[in-house]
């Protein structure tokens, strides 16, 4: 079948099962958009900014488990994708970004809106390429999807010169290659892991984003029941184990629970599943746990990178556990579980739930949705409060920027999540500083009628930065105060989304119920105190045992 390059692009997307693309048109990608006009099988969501398109593709991928796709034109259109691509890269999210560049004969001549986006994005993608020959186009797009969703998942960028989008070439349908889960660990290594686990008296399981990526909920839950083991998670691992599970001790790391941070030092074997020992989880690596460590990860580069381990099993967590668990003995650890329960009781998460605080807002959302909603967040105090106080029932329900920490991420991600999972309730929890970053995507929400609920935790400061300034910078509040005349309710309504401002728990409860019942896009601005803090907290450079909370500060 003879097609032009733009038609070939869209046929390849259909081959891959793509039903939605997020993007913004422009001169060099115009041929692809012209072909899209006659391709009803693919829904296009016009965002307000290319960064919003990248975040929407990312949110779609996280919520559905599919590859997210975004389009942008050359020059600034392409560079506006960079933050979103980097966000996906840091969290290992499968996204294919397709950009168009100037014609082949104009490359290297500083042509209008020309930029080497393949070169720019090389450090933040699994692979990036520029297509100058139409004979390479179809197989390059197929390759992009294969790379994005195989092994350790991640973003791929395909840049296509404009002449290729207009030329014609023979296209033949190809069925996508089946992605076979990787297990590089051999039988002897798995057997050794089983022996270590069977000997352990106080095992502790640490669940990371790798478990989310392969939807290993069932296997991980079976493991902790088999081992009668306490379990903690990273920000990216939320929901793999239910937040209501009695064995669950909470998140590990800088703003994790004291039970998880202290319990890790009391175990004799730490079983790490799909987590990469980031600095936010392990603090001072020199003072990390003295227990033996088994690390299961799909990426060999993550082994012994931050923390030395006693045994590594390279492979897809889900498949490794399927091989490992038949070798494990059924355990009962009443004394160890009692010790961990004491830690939980001695160091509970305590916060004022009567006044309108960040945790109170998150708790109200949890109570109203029963832990079943997809929650997206931006980055800062509200993000940590969400991780601490919303009890997730399954993976892919917390969608947040973990590795890059991208302010302005949440609203675009919420759009992608809701379009990918139309039957799910989707709520974006943001802060006033983050809301300012990409509030223009409310125009996308209203234009596309995407019924997401935007909850703004407004303390009129950059809350997390202010918290650090309070605790470690002698209250020198340099450029973190946002107490200006911006009216978020009017801004939201001006962009087509109904909004309300609340100042009490009762007002929020009423407004949130109305938002849920409306099935329409809504914004709720919550006014809280500027000096509310996220506790527990580990100071920069501190060990996990250095975690402190408000009561510790009062005693010091």
Image: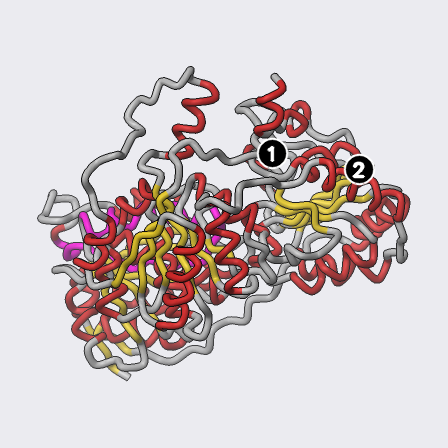
Query: Which image quadrant is residue 349 in?
Result: top right
Q: Which residue is drawn at 16% across and 63% down?
A: 163
In the displayed structure, 141 sits above or below 1; it is above
Report if residue 96 lies within the magenta region: yes
Q: Quick one: quadrant of the C terminus?
A: top right
For marks 2 and 1, the one nearer the N-term is 2
Image position of 421 (left or right of 264)? left
Marks 2, 1: nearer the viewer = 2
Q: Quick one: quadrant of the N terminus?
A: bottom left
Q: Which mark is residue 453?
A: none
In the displayed structure, 147 sits above or below 478; it is below
Query: Which image quadrant is residue 441 in?
Result: bottom left
Q: Tell me the crowding category of disc 1: few under 14, some 14 to 19, or many 20 or more residues within 10 angstroms, Cα based.
A: few
In the displayed structure, 141 sits above or below 313; it is below
Point out residue 131 in the picture as x, y percentages from the top left corner: 28, 58
Q: Which residue is drawn at 71% across and 33% down?
A: 262
| Residue at the extreme left | 112
In depth, the one of 48 and 132 nearer the eye is 48
Q: Tell me the crowding category of disc 2: few under 14, some 14 to 19, or many 20 or more residues within 10 angstroms, Cα based.
A: many
In depth, the one of 406 and 86 nearer the eye is 406
Query: Which image quadrant is residue 12 in?
Result: bottom left
Point out residue 27 in the picture as x, y percentages from the top left corner: 12, 60
Identify the element where label 1 is drawn.
loop
Do we see residue 132 in this rendering?
A: no
Check disc 1 and report the residue beneath it: 305
Check disc 2 and report the residue beneath it: 267
For the record, the magenta segment spans 76-105
């Amino acid at each position: 079948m003879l097609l032009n390059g733009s038609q070939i692009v869209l046929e390849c997307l259909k081959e891959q099962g793509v039903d939605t693309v997020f993007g913004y048109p422009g001169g060099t990608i115009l041929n692809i958009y012209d072909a899209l006009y006659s391709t009803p099988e693919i829904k296009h969501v016009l965002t307000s900014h290319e960064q919003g398109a990248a975040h929407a593709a990312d949110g779609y991928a996280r919520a559905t488990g599919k590859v997210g796709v975004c389009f942008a034109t050359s020059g600034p259109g392409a560079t506006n994708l960079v933050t979103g691509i980097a966000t996906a890269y840091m969290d290992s999210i499968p996204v294919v970004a397709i950009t168009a560049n100037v014609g082949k004969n104009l490359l290297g001549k500083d042509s209008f809106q020309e930029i080497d986006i393949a070169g720019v994005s090389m450090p933040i993608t699994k692979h990036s390429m520029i297509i100058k020959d139409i004979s390479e186009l179809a197989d390059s797009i197929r390759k992009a999807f294969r790379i994005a969703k195989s092994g350790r998942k991640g973003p791929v960028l395909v840049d296509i010169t404009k002449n290729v989008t207009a030329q014609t070439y023979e296209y033949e349908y190809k069925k996508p290659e089946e992605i076979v889960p990787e297990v590089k660990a051999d039988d002897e290594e798995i057997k050794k892991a089983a022996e270590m686990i069977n000997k352990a008296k106080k095992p502790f399981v640490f669940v990371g984003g790798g478990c989310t990526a392969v939807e290993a909920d069932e296997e991980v839950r079976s493991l902790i029941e088999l081992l009668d083991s306490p379990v903690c998670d990273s920000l990216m691992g939320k929901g793999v184990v239910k937040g209501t599970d009695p064995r669950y001790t909470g998140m590990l790391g800088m703003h994790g629970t004291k039970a998880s941070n202290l319990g890790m030092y009391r175990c004799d074997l730490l079983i790490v599943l799909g987590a990469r020992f980031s600095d936010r989880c392990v603090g001072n690596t020199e003072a990390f746990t003295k227990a033996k460590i088994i690390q299961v990860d799909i990426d060999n580069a993550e082994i012994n990178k931050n923390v030395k381990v006693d045994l590594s099993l390279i492979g897809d967590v889900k498949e490794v556990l399927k091989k490992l668990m038949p070798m494990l003995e059924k355990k009962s650890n009443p004394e160890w579980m009692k010790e961990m329960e004491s830690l939980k009781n001695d160091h509970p998460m305590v916060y004022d739930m009567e006044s309108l605080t960040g945790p109170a807002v998150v708790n109200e959302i949890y109570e109203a949705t029963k832990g079943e909603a997809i929650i997206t967040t931006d980055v800062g105090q509200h993000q940590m409060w969400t991780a601490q106080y919303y009890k997730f029932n399954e993976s892919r329900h917390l969608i947040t920027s973990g590795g890059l920490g991208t302010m302005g991420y949440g609203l675009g991600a919420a759009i992608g999540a809701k379009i990918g999972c139309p039957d799910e309730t989707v709520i974006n929890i943001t802060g006033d500083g983050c809301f300012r970053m990409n509030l223009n995507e409310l125009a996308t929400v209203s234009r596309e009628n995407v019924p997401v609920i935007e909850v703004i935790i407004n303390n009129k400061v950059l809350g997390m930065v202010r918290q650090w300034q309070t605790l470690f910078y002698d209250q020198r509040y340099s450029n973190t105060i946002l107490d200006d005349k911006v009216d978020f309710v009017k801004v939201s309504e001006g962009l087509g989304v109904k909004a309300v401002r609340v100042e009490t728990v009762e007002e929020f409860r009423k407004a949130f119920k109305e938002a849920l019942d409306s099935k329409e896009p809504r914004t709720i601005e919550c006014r809280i105190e500027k000096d509310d803090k996220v506790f527990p907290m580990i100071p920069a450079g501190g060990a996990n045992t250095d975690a402190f909370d408000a009561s510790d500060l009062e005693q010091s």
